[in-house]
Image (cartoon, rainbow, N blue to C red):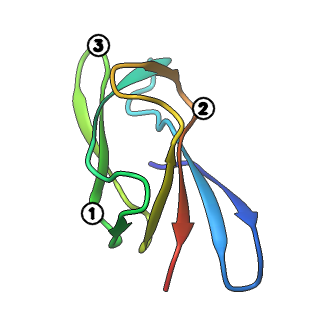
């Protein structure tokens, strides 16, 4: 369900921009309602990174891999179009 854009920084590090997922066919935007990981925090694959809300549903977004949260692109409470960047992470082993 997550879309991601990979940017290679070096052979050992990969930075990834996580994008707003499309939860339903009619979804055009969602709101980031809660960040569960702050910049600098480590997380494991499937940890909940943030929660989004649409007109019909609230959904927790899981980490696609082990990593470190680098940046929140979108602050809590802000609407985001589907496919727009939400946060930057660094993939770790």
Residue identifier under label 1: 47
How many C-alpha atoms fall within 10 Å of the one at disc 3: few (<14), some, or many (≥20)? few
Q: Residue furthest top?
A: 55
Residue identifier under label 2: 84
Residue 26 position, x and y percent, is 44, 17
Give the answer, above or below, for where 89 lies relative to 87. Answer: below
How many C-alpha atoms fall within 10 Å of the one at disc 1: few (<14), some, or many (≥20)? some
- Along the horizontal axis of the image, is 60 left or right of 10? left
Residue displayed at 33% across by 73% down: 44
Which mark is in front, 3 or 1? 1
- Along the horizontal axis of the image, is 27 left or right of 89? left
Q: Quadrant of residue 24?
A: top left
For marks 3 and 1, the one nearer the N-term is 1
Disc 3 secondary structure class? loop
Residue 80 position, x and y percent, is 50, 22
For marks 2 and 3, the one nearer the N-term is 3
Residues under numbered marks 2 and 3 in contact, where contact means CB atoms less than 8 Å apart: no
Give the answer, above or below, for where 77 lies relative to 69. Answer: above
Disc 2 secondary structure class? loop
Disc 1 secondary structure class? loop
Question: In this view of the protein, which residue sits in the foreground, 56 or 32?
Answer: 32
Residue identifier under label 3: 55
Disc 3/disc 1 C-alpha distance (Å): 24 Å
Give the answer, above or below, for where 87 lies relative to 27. Answer: below
Residue displayed at 49% across by 36% down: 20
Q: Is residue 27 visible?
A: no
Disc 1/disc 2 C-alpha distance (Å): 21 Å
Give the answer, above or below, for where 6 lies relative to 24. Answer: below
For marks 1 and 2, the one nearer the N-term is 1
């Amino acid at each position: 369900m997550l879309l991601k854009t990979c940017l290679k920084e070096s052979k050992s590090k990969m930075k990834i921009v996580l994008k707003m997922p499309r939860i339903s066919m009619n979804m055009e935007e969602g709101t980031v309602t809660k960040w569960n990981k702050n910049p600098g925090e480590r997380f494991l694959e499937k940890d909940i990174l943030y929660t989004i809300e649409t007109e019909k549903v609230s959904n927790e977004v899981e980490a696609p891999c082990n990593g470190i949260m680098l940046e929140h692109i979108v602050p809590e409470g802000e609407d985001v179009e589907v496919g727009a960047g939400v946060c930057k992470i660094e993939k770790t082993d």
